[in-house]
Image (cartoon, helix red, strand yellow):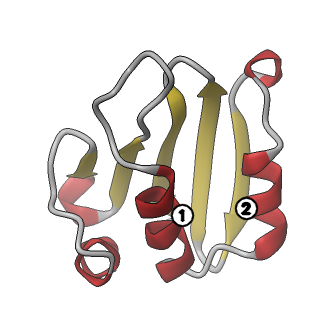
């Protein structure tokens, strides 16, 4: 599932798109204003869209500020948690619920 979403968005597995837990989790590192390494926002949201992330969760992610701390949302057997800082971008972990 996670590997398929990476392939659909033409993103290779790397430190910025890391599969873990025998394929049941995915960590996405987004580039920020000061951290130029990482996935583009378009790549991150392409992957999340491929995973069926609802529009309301995407809007919640886009409206997260650095003051909000770590946020979390679930859909269709998956949970995503993310944090945002302008210097680092949106860092997201998605995992399959047991």
Q: Is mark 2 on a helix, strand or loop?
A: helix
Q: How many marks on residues? A: 2
Would residue 57 be found to the left or right of residue 13 on screen? right
Residue under the point 30% across and 84% down: 8
When the figure is inspected, residue 45 is found, relative to residue 77, above or below; the finding is above
Upstream in sequence: badge 2 or badge 1: 1
Give residue 4's mark.
none
Q: In which quarter of the image is residue 71?
A: top right
The residue tagged 2 is: 58
Q: In which quarter of the image is the N terminus?
A: bottom left
**Residue 52, horizontal then vertical, whole percent:** 59, 81
Residue under the point 51% across and 43% down: 92
**Residue 65, horizontal then vertical, whole percent:** 79, 27
The residue tagged 1 is: 45
Would residue 75 be found to the left or right of residue 52 on screen? right
**Residue 91, horizontal then vertical, whole percent:** 50, 36
**Residue 50, horizontal then vertical, whole percent:** 48, 81
When the figure is inspected, residue 55 is found, relative to residue 94, above or below; the finding is below
**Mark 1, residues whose alpha carbon is within 10 Å: few (<14), some, or many (≥20)?**
some
Residue under the point 50% across and 23% down: 33
Measured Cα–Cα span from mark 2 to mark 1: 8 Å
Do the numbered discs 2 and 1 sit on residues whose CB atoms are within 8 Å? yes
**Mark 2, residues whose alpha carbon is within 10 Å: few (<14), some, or many (≥20)?**
some
Residue under the point 78% across and 73% down: 55
Q: What element carries label 1?
A: helix
When the figure is inspected, residue 71 is found, relative to residue 24, above or below; the finding is above
Would residue 59 be found to the left or right of residue 34 on screen? right
């Amino acid at each position: 599932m996670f590997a398929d979403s990476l392939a659909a968005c033409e993103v290779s597995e790397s430190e910025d798109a890391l599969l873990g837990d025998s394929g049941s989790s995915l960590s996405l590192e987004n580039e920020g204003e000061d951290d130029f390494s990482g996935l583009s926002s378009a790549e991150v949201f392409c992957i999340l869209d491929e995973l069926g992330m609802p529009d309301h969760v995407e809007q919640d992610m886009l409206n997260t500020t650095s003051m909000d701390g770590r946020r979390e949302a679930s859909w269709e057997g998956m949970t995503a948690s993310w944090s945002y800082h302008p210097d680092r971008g949106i860092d997201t972990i998605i995992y399959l619920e047991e």
